[in-house]
Amino acid sequence: MNWEAFWLTVRLAAIVSTLLIAIGIPIAYWLTYSRWRWKFLVEAAVALPIVLPPTVLGFYVLVALGSRSPLGRWWESLTGHTLAFTFEGLVIGSLLYSLPFAVQPFAASFGAVDPKLLGASASLGHSPVQTFRRIVLPLSKAGLVTGFALSFAHTLGEFGVVLMVGGNIPGVTRTISIDIYDQVQIANYSSANQTALLLLVISFVVLSVVYGLNRRPWVVGPWR
Amino acid sequence: MAVKVTAAPQTAPAASIQPISSDLEVHIRKRFPNPEGSFNLNVHFRALAGFTIVFGASGAGKTTLLDCIAGLSDPDDGRIAVGGQDLYDSEKKRNVAAWKRRIGYVHQDLALFPHLTAEENVAYGLHRLSAEERQTRSREMLDAFRIDHVRDRRPAQISGGERQRVALARALVTEPRALMLDEPLAALDRPTKSSLVGDLRKWNQHHRVPILFVTHNGEEVFALGDEVIVLDAGRIVAQGQPHEVMHAPRLETVAHLSGFENIFDATVLGLHEARGTMTCRLGSSEVELETPLVRAEVGSRLRVGVRAGDLLLATIDPHGLSARNVLPGTIRRLVQRDVIVSAMVDCSGTEFEVHVTLAARDALQLVPGKGVWVVVKTHSCHLLGM
């Protein structure tokens, strides 16, 4: 059991899913309320990581982070090293990779809030942003938790993007799924089995929380 | 034509709002979808401080009208102003955002915030005040609407009547410039209704704002209305004081809505100008009715509406009555609804619906097949426009 890889992965997943709350909420807000006619193109782009092979996504992220891209050059001038094959690079790749797993539950729960409540809030003098904060967000707690949990679990298990963007540097970019792959490569099945089982259990627990939470009628939810 | 939102006048902080008496002027058109296709809302009226009833069948455009005034929906063109201040004006390209309009709106479904307590719901619109003042004002309102005892409960945990009160209190506490009430009493029993109406009246004695009150219940029109507007398919078809509009409904839509169970096609047979009456034949039957005189010619066709509750039934041929119309007939069916019995009586081919009490049914031993006389007063016959 490679605890170093385990904690690195947990740290990566926690950072990514937390950042996705901050990034995903505005995107989901826009997707829910925008009446722009080309909105569906943005929806498709956000959903892309669900169907794209991780190696394809990883390849483009690698190119974008490399020293030939503006982003890569800017980062290099700032820090003196490239983003590729670093933990930060891994975070950026994972953000893109898990984006739909946060944005879609967010947007679904925002959209499920009764428009009459939004009208009532407006009639009571609240601007759209105030209404979003005081009505939509509190009523979307289940969706926010779902998005957080799904993007956490999804990041935890990623392989292709990590391999492309981060490589396999112990303590920096070696995550558990890569560790499992390494163990199998050297025929260390018992270690691979332990790690795989742990990942399986964590994923199951996270998904159980998601489904258990969404079963509750949110009208009189457990929070106050 | 869509009108872009333009800058609104800065609304005064709620603390300094003085009650202002202000008229609501509405002159708008809006095309809106309806189960039977789309049609145009096209209305022009002025509502003074006090209750104005907006009366009409479902789908007549009542809610669309309220949404446009509240700013939740944009008209195609026209003008909406309250107290002389424009909220919407397509010519001036002016459209004040809903949240800056200060129009109170109680939706048919109340739209209480499910995650907030009754008190938090009521205090919601007072967000510009200090926490202290917010509490004072919402407590006062909870007290005035007799819902102080449920202030810490959520909407799902209180009764329908209490929810209705919370919704009203929440809208009123912000001291709106006008109030839109979309069937706010629909789900209430009668005692709850009248006490709520009393509280609402009391509130408006101090505030004097225009209140548009949507209903399709004829009783509420009489109970509340200073003025009634009848909407049908998006147009105002009648307007005036409730007793004028509802008791002398010249339009068939109003007649149906205000409870004319009997509406007949009729042909004018003769005019009796000296007596102020005329004789009409109903449909293609032999039945003749004496009705009040209206401007009509012999041979012209019109419609007669008679309320089932205005008709009398007799089991022997009545004599010495002032009523001019006594029609022999046969009871076809009896239907009991609550404490009213509807008797369907066939008078030589024309069927009348007559309402009698349970006691009358039993005393007269009314059963299907029994021969009866239907008594119709001349002034119970209302002539309706076609």
Image (cartoon, rainbow, N blue to C red):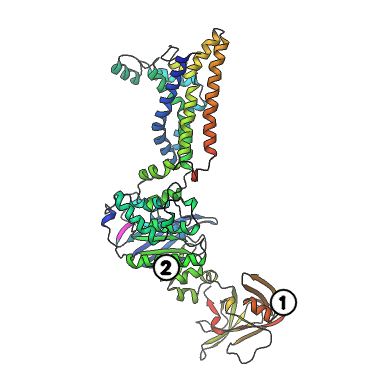
Looking at the picture, tell me which residue is in the foreground, B46 or A187: A187
Q: Chain of mark 2?
A: B
SS class, disc 1: loop
On residue B367, the disc is 1
Residue nearest the observer in this picture, B189 or B186: B189
Q: CA distance from mark 2 to mark 1?
A: 43 Å
- In the displayed structure image, the side of residue A62 where residue A157 appears, left or right: right
Question: What's the chain of the residue with tag 1?
Answer: B
Residue type at mark 1: give it.
Val
Tell me the crowding category of disc 1: few under 14, some 14 to 19, or many 20 or more residues within 10 angstroms, Cα based.
some
Of the 4 image quadrants, the one containing the C terminus of chain A is top left
Q: Main secondary structure of the magenta part?
A: strand
Residue A43 versus residue B248 in the image, above or below? above
Q: Answer with left or right where residue B169 lies relative to residue A210.
A: left
* Span colored in magenta: B85-89
Q: Residue at x 47, y 15 (%)?
A: A3
Q: Position of residue A48 (x, y in %)?
A: 48, 28
Residue ranking furthest to the top: A186
Residue with the mark numbered 2? B198
Where is residue B204 drawn, in percent x and y?
A: 36, 66
Q: Could you say whether the residue bearing mark 2 is in a helix, strand or loop?
A: helix
Task: Name the residue at 55% across, 71% down.
Answer: B259
* Label 2 vs 1, first from the N-terminus: 2
In percent of width and height, residue B113 lies at 44, 49
Q: Position of residue B206 (x, y in %)?
A: 32, 66
Q: Tell us which disc is closer to us: 2 or 1.
A: 2
Residue B292 appearing in the image: yes
